[in-house]
Image: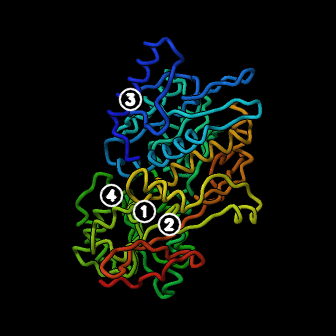
Amino acid sequence: MKRTHLWSALVLVLALVLGACASGGTTTTAAPGTTAAPGTTAAPGTTAAPGTTAAPGAPAPKVVTIGFTASVTGKFNTSSTRQVDGLQLWMDDVNNAGGITLGDGTVITFKAVTYDDESNKDRVQELYTKLATDDDADFLISPYSSGLTAASAVIAEQYGKVMITTGAASDSVYTQGYTSVYQVYTPSSRYLTSSVDLLTSLDPSAKKIAFVYENSKFSTGVVKAAKKYAEDNGFDVVLFEGYDPETTDFNPFINKIQAAVPDAILGGGHFQDGSAFARQLYEKNVPVKFVSLLVAPPEPTFAELGDAALGIAGPSQWEPAVKFTEASAAAAGADWIGLSSSDFVSEYKAAYGEEPSYHSAGGYAAGLLLQYAIQKADSLDNDAIKAALDATNLVTFFGPLRFDTTADFHGLQIAHDMVVVQWQKSGDQLVKQIVWPKAGATADAVYPLAR
């Protein structure tokens, strides 16, 4: 299945609904394999599962509504699109397999209601309120980015809706006393610490780090935690400078970096600014040994920078080469659900014609987590599903998932860890290698950078 055209999906949804009205038959939803168009609304509540009928005496099948926004427009479009594609692929897999069957025989399938949040926090609060009220979504998935997720989590908690967050790493969402919000990603406080560990292993004499980062909720949280970690491990932070999210000219920051003469640069923010920063560091031939940036390097399209991408490292929530299996789950005393990494990659490429990024994997993993909680609860009851999430000890192809259940940090992810990737040359091609941790590395890190 190629990426569904939004307006084509809208036309399909309307055609199905009109067809049902014309025949006076059972209400239907979009066929499995289609994506509800952002800006459209599917029928609120639950309806009969598409293409299913209950056996005599069996409970009526149900279609569960999952509400979320996507950054169809705005600066988060690249990462948000992949997150939604991953989530949609999970939904298609479950629906095409016949749904989830509860103990009482109820068959559950899923449909999406989604809108374009325009990468805008104000739009997110308005739209998640609509999802929770007008659309009566049964469950919510977060938008992409920590800032937008913080805005949506308030609404989820206000209306008592279980929300699975993905594409959002900030720790602060989970210090608000919420009881309905659960994080899939490794928290931002642990995002760049692995890059510090890698630098230490590569060059014990490297002691000077410059942090240049986007002034956003996510990035600021990451670098503050990484700065403390670096200083605690003997590094001198020679520059700690934030830039506005809309920054396109990094020359003023590059001038400060050159004056500080660091061994390493850590920071960045999201895809657009991180890519521009990496390109301008290359164009200015900044003499630095190691660069690790947030979010942008793990994206497959980062390779479009060409030589400017070479040697750039970055933390990643997941990579195709990372292997978690049912056996590794059993060894850890955890439950297992879903498909293997290789099957996910194959399905994703077949569906969308490109390699999945960790945002894609995070979208699929959010769906798997919700599926797991419904199956463990054997119910759609909100409290039963929250209890199942609280008790989660799960491994999927995305990695381990478990939550802090204390009042101070409820819903914070405590089991999932980061890997570090680096773009390297293989012949004439740029390839993304896992360089940390050593136990899971696919190549040695290139160090120092040839600049």
Could you say which disc has been placed on residue 294 in the image?
Answer: 1
In the rendered structure, are the residues bearing label 3 and label 2 in contact, judged by CB atoms less than 8 Å apart? no
Q: Residue at x 43, y 30 (%)?
A: 127
Q: Please identify, in this view, whether the residue under mark 4 or under mark 1 is nearer the observer.
A: 1
Q: Nearer the viewer, mark 3 or mark 4?
A: 3
Q: Position of residue 131 (x, y in %)?
A: 49, 28
According to the picture, the residue beneath numbered tag 2 turns out to be 192
Residue 195 in the image: state x and y as whole percent: 49, 72
Q: Please, what secondary structure does the residue beneath circle 3 have? A: helix
Closer to us: 47 or 295: 47
Q: Quadrant of residue 212?
A: bottom left
Contact check, label 1 and label 3, Cβ < 8 Å: no
Q: Give the spatial CA distance, label 2 vs label 1.
A: 8 Å
Q: Report the residue marked by disc 4.
A: 243
Name which residue type carries label 4: Tyr
- Identity, as a three-letter code, of the amino acid under mark 2: Leu
Q: Check disc 4: other Cα within 10 Å, few if <14, some if 14-19, many if 20+.
A: some
Q: Which residue is mark 3?
A: 12
Name the colouring of the figure.
rainbow
